[in-house]
Amino acid sequence: MRTALTLLFLLALGALPGALLPQRSLNSAKVDQFIVDNGWWGRLLDKGQFFAVYGSFWFSAIYVLLFVSLIGCLVPRLWEYFNQMRAKPVLTPRNLARMPHHAEGHSDVGVDEVVAAANARLKGWRKVEREEADGGRTISAERGYLRETGNLLFHFALLGLLVAFALGKMFGYEGQVIVQATGKQYCNSGVFNFDSFRPGLRVDGTQLTPFCVRVNDFHASYLHNGQAESFRADIDYQSGADLDTGTWKPYPLEVNHPLRTEGDRLYLLGHGYTPKFTVTFPNGEVRSGEVQWRPVDPITLLSEGATKFDPPLITDSEERRKNQLAITGLLAPSAVFDGTLLSSNFPEARKPAVAVDVYRGDLGTDSGRGQSIFSIDQSMVDKGRLVKVARKNLEVGQSTTLDDGTVVRFDGVTDWVSLQVSHDPAQVYVLVFSMLMVLGLGVSLAIRRRRVWVRVLPQEDGRTFIEVGGLARTDQAGYGGEFTGLSRDLLSAGQDKES
């Protein structure tokens, strides 16, 4: 037990870095920045896997050792518990006056009557009656076996909770995806549909639970200081047999009120804005672009991003790369201008505006390397292959004309929502084991293990001597009052009581 407690302490201590340090699985960019800011100290923490605490070798070792220690602790205790349940209450001590609780008295009632009355009073106690060599008769009684039952229940539930957590990490997964709140759809059919995906150790992403979601609209309410009060996405979803029939079911998706379907949970994490740009090329061709921009200010939802375009009707790949366009900059939902500087004073789209830089040239999208949708490849700018051709502040409906006659118009904003799909096949077991832990802990704390002994001796003058002793096996707190009432009842058949 001491080993298990030590390991439990180490597990809690080992979890502290996971709460205090950025974790790579949650925000790899923040981890990289932390390492850069802290030099050798950050690199040392990285080598020690402190930025991936819950998957580190040392945390896993503590977890496994705690698991083994609990099993090694509980199996012998369980065997001992079964032996105690079958064992008879212990013999009555020779000197009951040494017990923490003691009372005695005399009675004119015979021994048989006193013993019968004591047995009746101790109904519900586990007891055994014995005879002594001097002609006396004793009753040994015990109560509170459920205390150890609750103790074992708590520890076995803890063991089950550890197993359930491990199974959840092995066979569960989490994925995040951004969906435009304009009737766009998302289907849980493969990892390629997610913007980020964290699989369990035994998940390869090929057997995800199939369901589809269509985000029709998004509503947000804010306090006067800009703090979000409520988010709600009006969605339709298909799952199970509905996928075959094409039936859509409505659901109001809110924060902390996930959609539960087919064993998965769909959470609403947050939202942002998508600017809509219309580009009219010199030949008259028109292209529209709607790509989500990410918030850089969580209070005002001032956002940044990049919307990219390929020129139309150009089949030569080299020529096409020379004439690609990128619109980058800031988006303010409630625009405030300080001269030419743009900022936002409220997260609601009251007066949308953008401050954009327009680049023309090679975006580097054909290089075969991954590229963020929120930014352009700065290396292409440094090489001179991507050149800034315009800078402009635009409100809804305003446009700017580039040097070659291309017109870029800002047409407003739409909402996007960030959704998370969570699959944990062990979540029901985690709930059950957690409830059993609480139940077991409550039983072990509320019930006291206690013993009482009664000795009845016939006296030479024809009277009967009654002696009662009591002992609380775990603690004496609270047993004094119970023993006083019990001994009073056991001695009630006598006269001239003493205590």
Image (cartoon, helix red, strand yellow):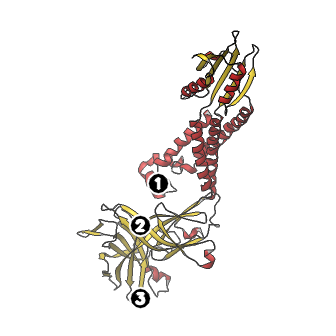
Number of the label disc, if any, that sits on residue 31: 1
**Which of the two marks, 2 or 3, is nearer to us in this view?**
2
Labels 2 & 3 near each other (Cβ < 8 A): no
* Residue 452 in the figure: left or right of residue 419: right
Binning the other alpha carbons within 10 Å of mark 3 as few (below 14), some (14 to 19) or many (20 upward) gives few
Between 73 and 32, the one nearer to me in the picture: 73
Q: Secondary structure at mark 3?
A: loop
Binning the other alpha carbons within 10 Å of mark 1 as few (below 14), some (14 to 19) or many (20 upward) gives many
Q: Secondary structure at mark 1?
A: helix
Q: Check the image and report above or below for 192 versus 451.
A: below
Residue that badge 3 annotates: 285
Residue 494: where, in percent of width, then height? 62, 19
Instruction: Give the alpha-carbon distance from disc 1 to disc 3, as whole Å.
Output: 44 Å
Q: Check the image and report above or below for 149 versus 307.
A: above
Q: Earlier in the sequence, mark 2 or mark 3?
A: 3
Residue 257: where, in percent of width, then height? 49, 62
Residue that badge 2 annotates: 294
Q: Earlier in the sequence, mark 1 or mark 3?
A: 1
